[in-house]
Image (spheres, coloured by chain):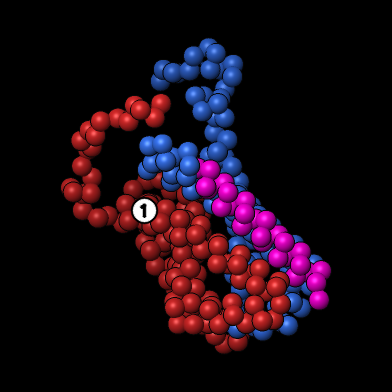
Amino acid sequence: MAQNTPTARPLSPHLQIYRPMLSMMLSIMHRITGAGLYFGMAPLVLWLVAAASGPESFAVAQAIAGSILGQIVLFAATWALIHHTLGGVRHLIWDMGYGFDLPGVEFTGRIIAVLPVLLTILIWVAAYFKG
Amino acid sequence: MTSFRTPLNKVRGLGSAKSGVHHWVSERISAIAGLPLVLFAIWLGVSLAGADHAAVAVAFHHPLTAILAALFLLTQLWHMKLGMQVIIEDYVHSSAKIVLLLANSAFTYLLGALALYALVKLSFGA
């Protein structure tokens, strides 16, 4: 099984010939945000463990989260979560059989490109004024 | 259109992966189940932004907060395990594939154990 590694065969070119289209970009962004959120679960869980471990550990966790790098990561993670979630809803709509025509895909695609940014900003403004 | 299903295939109904569309359906179910929980998690994150330890402890003493947080983590861990499995299967075809698939399981289950321990400790602790 392992010794039968397939000889490298030429693949049909895609990245070299297709102009980047919204549909392609959103598709790979859905996967990238998913993978990003996957790894982002680790710091989230570690933050919870720090909270459960007492005020000293939690203070360290909050200091990391509150640092400039931490805030940038959190902002990106918020956007990734909303982008992946809304994109996922779009997928579910397709799974039910709706919106898979070209105008529908373009229309919902534009929403997914813009709305997550707006919602991320909204959420961060809300958090800023709350704290 | 011609059906490509063999008679045995029709009886078993599960295809060459032996589990049919189970993975695909589970991905959707975990996504749908997680959707309201993601909204809850965002709300919780906003309300706990910049909070000190005392505030966080008080928040998780409330049973609903702890339970919903646990459900959020469990559904998301389930969903992300399924998703990463697809990514690995799409891009890795060497002997590293099995190692990565095992690592995927280990990662998600480990995070689950850590998260549940932390939530129990937070909700029942001081």
Residue B74 locus on image (x, y percent): 65, 54
Residue A98 is at least partly visible in this image: no
At which x and y percent is residue B10?
Answer: 55, 17
Residue B107 forms part of the magenta stretch: yes
Magenta part of the chain: B101-126
Residue for badge 1: A28
Could you say which is closer to the camera, residue B57 or residue A19? B57
Chain letter, colour blue in render: B
What is the secondary structure assignment of the residue under circle 1? helix
Quadrant of the snapshot with the C terminus of chain B: bottom right
User: Looking at the picture, how far across and down is residue A117, in whole percent?
Assistant: 42, 71
Instruction: Identify the residue at horizontal 54%, vertical 78% (top origin).
Output: A65
Q: Residue B81: x, y in percent? A: 55, 48
Question: Is A28 located above or below residue B45 in the figure?
Answer: above
**Residue at figure coordinates x 47%, y 38% from the top left:** B98
Q: Nearer the viewer, residue A118 or B114?
A: B114
